[in-house]
Image: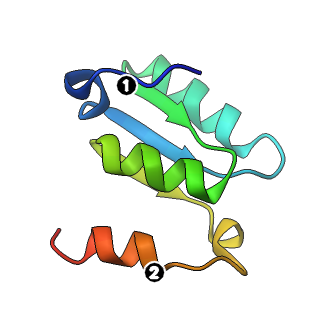
């Protein structure tokens, strides 16, 4: 999936729920309410996309198990 432009990126909801159909279902619901949506299937991709901009992010708890959160926490610090 191509990276969205900066203005579009800041208006989207980024979803990181790599297991099952959770991300697909959430995007479908959000799109039905007029929200732009993007998904990430891996943690590194999620961090890259959130650094590129997002209006909001939804993360499934199980998606964070066993990953190094250093880069994400560094990004969250100034928020």
Residue 75 vs residue 60: left or right?
left
Mark 2 surroundings: few (<14), some (14-19) or many (≥20) residues within 10 A: few
Residue 18 in view here: yes
The quadrant in which the N terminus is found is top right
Please provide percent x and percent y for residue 18: 73, 50
Q: For residue 61, which quarter of the picture?
A: bottom right
Could you tell me which residue is drawn at 31 percent across and 30 percent down? 9
Query: In the rendered structure, which disc, 2 or 1, sits on the residue that comes first in sequence?
Result: 1
Please provide percent x and percent y for residue 38: 50, 32
Q: Distance between the residues labelled 2 and 1?
A: 29 Å
Question: Most extreme residue toward the right, as rendered?
Answer: 20
Residue 54 in view here: no
Residue 41 vs residue 7: left or right?
right
Please provide percent x and percent y for residue 79: 17, 68
Q: Name the residue under label 2.
A: 70
Question: In the depicted view, which residue is nearer to us: 50 or 61?
Answer: 50
Q: Mark 1 points at which residue?
A: 35
| Tag in front: 2 or 1 | 2
């Amino acid at each position: 999936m191509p990276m969205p432009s900066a203005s579009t990126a800041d208006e989207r909801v980024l979803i990181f729920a790599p297991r099952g159909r959770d991300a697909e279902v959430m995007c479908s619901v959000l799109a039905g309410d007029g929200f732009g949506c993007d998904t990430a299937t891996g943690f590194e991709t999620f961090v890259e996309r959130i650094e590129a901009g997002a209006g909001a992010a939804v993360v499934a708890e199980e998606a964070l198990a066993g990953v190094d959160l250093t880069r994400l926490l560094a990004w969250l610090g100034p928020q």
